[in-house]
Image: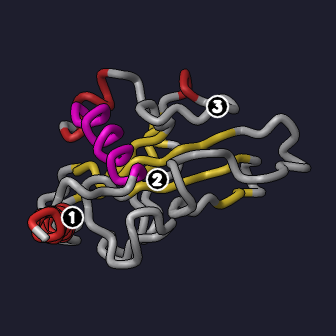
Amino acid sequence: MKHLFCLKGLTLLLLTATLFSCDKGDDSVREMWEIEVEQVTDATSKYLEFQAAETDGLIDVSGFVPNMGHHYLNPGLVDGTFELEKPEIILYAPNADGDMEMVAVEYAIVPDDPNNPGEAPEGFTGDEDIWHFNEMIGQWQLHVWTVLPNPDGIFAMFNPEVGE
């Protein structure tokens, strides 16, 4: 009888510990892609200062695109490889004072055959990321709204918070 009481007590203790460790509000329980977004955010934090983009030779390849911003490309990174901490493009949008503010990053992956691009690249862990093939320039693209929150989702192509 004493062993049964100890077993029930141990089971109750384990159940209690499990319930508290699985709390959905616990910040320590995150998806791998969320951790990866944090990694790219950290890796690109120097670009929060627009001057860093200019100093590193990034070039505006788009002008202002509504619901996206200006696409500042690092030509040295453009290839067929997804590198988590090295997005090819940093997106900027002018603030109310006209100063450029970083809003997002974008990956631009050139497939071996742009006329037959095949499947989207493997990017972030899981299937949350939304790749788009841009036929005009022959590359896979993935936007990640690392700075400006996007009500349509962190991986959505367009962000209504960026002006028209």
Residue with the mark numbered 3: 81
Q: Residues within 10 Å of mark 3 (few under 14, many from 20)?
A: some
Upstream in the sequence, badge 2 or badge 1? 1
Q: Main secondary structure of the magenta part?
A: helix
How many angstroms separate mark 1 from mark 3 (CA)?
A: 40 Å
Which labelled disc corresponds to residue 162?
A: none
Tell me if label 3 and label 2 are in contact, CB under 8 Å: no
Magenta residue span: 32-46
Along the viewing direction, whichever of 9 and 118 lies nearer the viewer:
9
Callout 1: helix, strand or loop?
helix
Dots 1 and 3: beta carbons under 8 Å?
Answer: no
- Secondary structure under the numbered disc 2 in the rendered image: loop
Q: In the figure, residue 148 lies in which quadrant?
A: bottom left
Q: Quadrant of the N terminus?
A: bottom left
Residue 119 location (% of width, % of height)? 78, 53
Left or right of 66? Residue 7 is left
Dot 2, how many residues are within 10 Å of its Cα: few (below 14), some (14-19), or many (20+)? few
Q: Is residue 49 left or right of residue 123?
A: left
The Cα–Cα distance between marks 3 and 2, rounded to whole angstroms, is: 25 Å
Write the residue at 25% across / 36% down.
42
Residue 125, horizontal then vertical, whole percent: 51, 49
The residue identified by callout 1 is 18
**Mark toward the viewer: 1 or 3:** 1
Left or right, residue 27 beside residue 136? left
Queried whether the magenta region covers residue 23, the answer comes back as: no
* For discs 3 and 2, the disc positioned in front in the rendered view: 3
Q: CA distance from mark 2 to mark 1?
A: 52 Å
